[in-house]
């Protein structure tokens, strides 16, 4: 099962906005509105940030937003803060495995 | 609040076995499916296995099929992962994670995760 493709790293200055992409195919990202995003700080458990492309769980800052266009989903972090420095993973429903596939992960650095 | 606490990790020789546990609290364990997800050192996340709320259906990643068995004891609010025929490629932090679907058949996303337990396969 091939992982979804994410950029290895993205960086930005405090207060800026950054966008992390998650590219798949018509069998996963492009075929369904079922994409989720997780934040993981070093040595910590993943935390759900977005589900079903653009829905935020209760308690997640509205600085985090999700979207999708074609086979690529995106996570945007606006008003970047030092605490946002972490690894981010996308996940998508896939025709081949309804329990999902993860992305390769992106390290976000706050300059 | 939802809490998931994994245990049972450690160092095991290639070919050996290990059983992981995950004790759940803060939600009605008997009504939600549960997942195991692993993360090799410095690598990304990999879904391992899923079990329905009542244990009636179980699903596995191809990489562990035939070697790992997921199970649950709803009377103890505990999830398990029996791992046999371990290889170095199984070295990872193993997380248990809650499925968001109430009486569901399994979702592509997980709403709560434990802190993980490290399994090291080495001679």
Image (cartoon, rainbow, N blue to C red):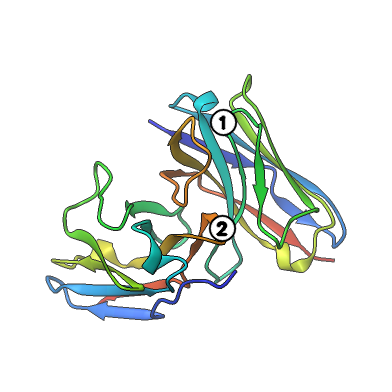
Question: What is the quadrant of the C terminus of chain A in the image?
Answer: bottom left
Residue drawn at (80%, 59%) of the image: B86
Residue A40: image tag: none
Image side of residue A6 versus residue A95, left or right: left
**On screen, B12 above or below B40?**
above
Q: Secondary structure at mark 2?
A: strand
For residue A50, what is the image quadrant?
bottom left
For residue B2, what is the image quadrant?
top left
Tag nearer the camera, 2 or 1: 2
Alpha-carbon distance for marks 2 and 1? 19 Å
Q: Secondary structure at mark 1?
A: loop
The total of numbered circles placed on residues is 2
Question: What is the quadrant of the N terminus of chain A in the image?
Answer: bottom right
Subunit under mark 1: B
**Could you tell me residue B46's position as x and y percent?**
57, 61
**On screen, B17 above or below B121?**
above
**Could you tell me residue A85's position as x and y percent?**
31, 67
Residue B53: image tag: 1
Residue drawn at (73%, 57%) of the image: B64
Residue A88 visible in image: no
Q: Are marks 2 and 1 in contact (CB under 8 Å)?
A: no
């Amino acid at each position: 099962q091939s992982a979804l493709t994410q950029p290895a790293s993205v960086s930005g200055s405090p207060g800026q906005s950054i966008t992390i992409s998650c590219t798949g195919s018509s069998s996963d990202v492009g075929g369904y509105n079922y994409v989720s995003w997780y934040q993981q700080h070093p040595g910590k458990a993943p935390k759900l940030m977005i589900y079903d492309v653009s829905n935020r769980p209760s308690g997640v800052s509205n600085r985090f937003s999700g979207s999708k266009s074609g086979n690529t989903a995106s996570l945007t972090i606006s008003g970047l803060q030092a605490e946002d420095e972490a690894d981010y993973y996308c996940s998508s429903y896939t025709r081949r495995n309804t329990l999902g596939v993860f992305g390769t992960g992106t390290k976000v650095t706050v300059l | 609040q939802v809490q998931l606490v994994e245990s049972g990790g450690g160092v095991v020789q290639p070919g050996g076995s290990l059983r992981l546990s995950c004790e759940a609290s803060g939600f009605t364990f008997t009504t939600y499916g549960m997942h195991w997800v692993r993360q090799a050192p410095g690598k990304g996340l990999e879904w391992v296995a899923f079990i329905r709320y009542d244990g009636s259906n179980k699903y596995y990643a191809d990489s562990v099929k035939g070697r790992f068995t997921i199970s649950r004891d709803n009377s103890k609010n505990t999830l398990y992962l029996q791992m046999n025929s371990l290889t170095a490629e199984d070295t990872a932090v193993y997380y248990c994670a809650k499925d968001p679907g109430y009486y569901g058949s399994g979702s592509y996303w997980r709403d709560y995760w434990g802190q993980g337990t490290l399994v090291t396969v080495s001679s």
